[in-house]
Amino acid sequence: MTDTATTTIDPAAVTPSPGIATVGILGSGIMGAGLAEVAARAGYTAIVRSRSQAAADAMVASIAKGLAKQVERGKLAEADRDAILGRLLATADLAGLADCDLVIESVVEDLAVKKDLFAQLDGIVKPSAILATNTSTLPVVDLAMVTNRPDQVCGIHFFNPAPAMKLVEIVRPLTASDATIETATAFAAACGKDAVEVKDQAGFIVNALLFPYLNNAIRLAEQGTASIADIDTAMKGGCNFPMGPFALLDLVGLDTSLAILDALYDEFRDANYAAVPMLRRMVAAGRLGRKSGRGFLEYTR
Ligand SMILES: NC(=O)c1ccc[n+]([C@@H]2O[C@H](COP(=O)([O-])OP(=O)(O)OC[C@H]3O[C@@H](n4cnc5c(N)ncnc54)[C@H](O)[C@@H]3O)[C@@H](O)[C@H]2O)c1
């Protein structure tokens, strides 16, 4: 997870994935916003659904602001910016996603919330549509099984910030058809991403390996072994990582990080995944990282 430059895709050069023209994005948080930008840049019509029209509109406005900066810096042509924004729609109504060919759910990392939304979506979107989740850790099969199209459900797991990060994990639950996985992989490629396929197991590849490291960094700080600032400096300078573990935890969001660790621990009962108490207390105190202005570090908005 780095602050590298945004992936630039020439919309004219896009080969859309077969059968996909309109992509629905459920959720307008950190990842929902990133996914909407990625899909619209890749030439798809992207419809973002948030629980309130104000939140959905605010998300589109924040994407517009980011694109305007790229135009100012000469990284994006004005006409391309206008075309991207022309493909971005926002709604507060779940039924607004009815005509989507692919819906990517990216709401809070809570299985009950996601299951409820998948069951509702299944009754709204057309029978041919693929329903995907951007979950970091939760069992994709549980979402597939609340629908009447378990063969058309998979994980499409982007990384944060989605416009900049190259990787997408394509998560194959036991129920998914080969055609669904192929379409999801083609969609990721059309978005300019490198796709890897992984079984439906908590944490997939990246988070299964990353989160023991992040959790143990908090443990080191909690034990007083070194300061937060020195641990971040050490991992950047000593391992050539683009950011230290605390900057990364704040970028991911501490509530999301806690939910990821809890899901990993639930699945594997491995002590490395047992969330360090300090993390749980930080979330209880509302210190969620960048998105709340304060996490392990402080941010001016
Ligand atoms: N943050 C990351 O680095 C990252 C990376 C990859 C994947 N993810 C995954 O993406 C998903 C979203 O994470 P995020 O970081 O964007 O979180 P976020 O906290 O920024 O946004 C969460 C979104 O969920 C919505 N929401 C909350 N409760 C809801 C409900 N009951 N019904 C409908 N919508 C609800 C919120 O309004 C918000 O739009 C999670 O599944 C997370 O695991 C996160």
Image (cartoon, grey):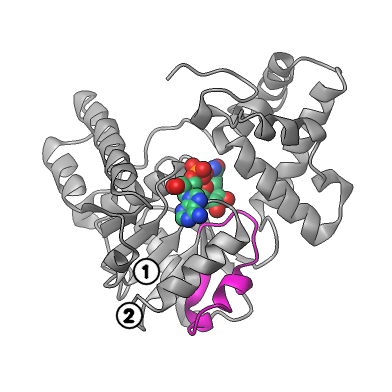
Q: Which residues are magenta?
A: 134-154
In the picture of the structure, the residue carrying the numbered disc 1 is 102
In the picture of the structure, the residue carrying the numbered disc 2 is 126
The answer to whether mark 2 is within 8 Å of ligand 1 is no
Task: Please identify the quarter of the rendering in which residue 278 is found.
Answer: top right
Residue 152 inside the magenta-drawn segment? yes
Residue 105 inside the magenta-drawn segment? no
Residue 228 placement (x, y as % from top left): 72, 18
Label total for image: 2
264 is higher (above) or lower (below) than 71? below
On residue 159, the disc is none
Left or right: where does residue 223 sit relative to residue 142?
Answer: right
Which part of the image, by quadrant, shows the C terminus?
top left
Question: How far apart are the two marked residues, 2 and 1, measured between alpha carbons?
Answer: 10 Å
Q: For the residue marked with disc 2, what is the amino acid?
A: Lys
Q: For the residue marked with disc 1, what is the amino acid?
A: Leu
Of callouts 2 and 1, the N-terminal one: 1
Residue 211 placement (x, y as % from top left): 72, 43
Q: Is residue 181 visible?
A: no
Residue, x 37% and y 37% (percent of image)?
6
Left or right: where does residue 268 sit relative to residue 201?
Answer: right
- At mark 2, the secondary structure is loop
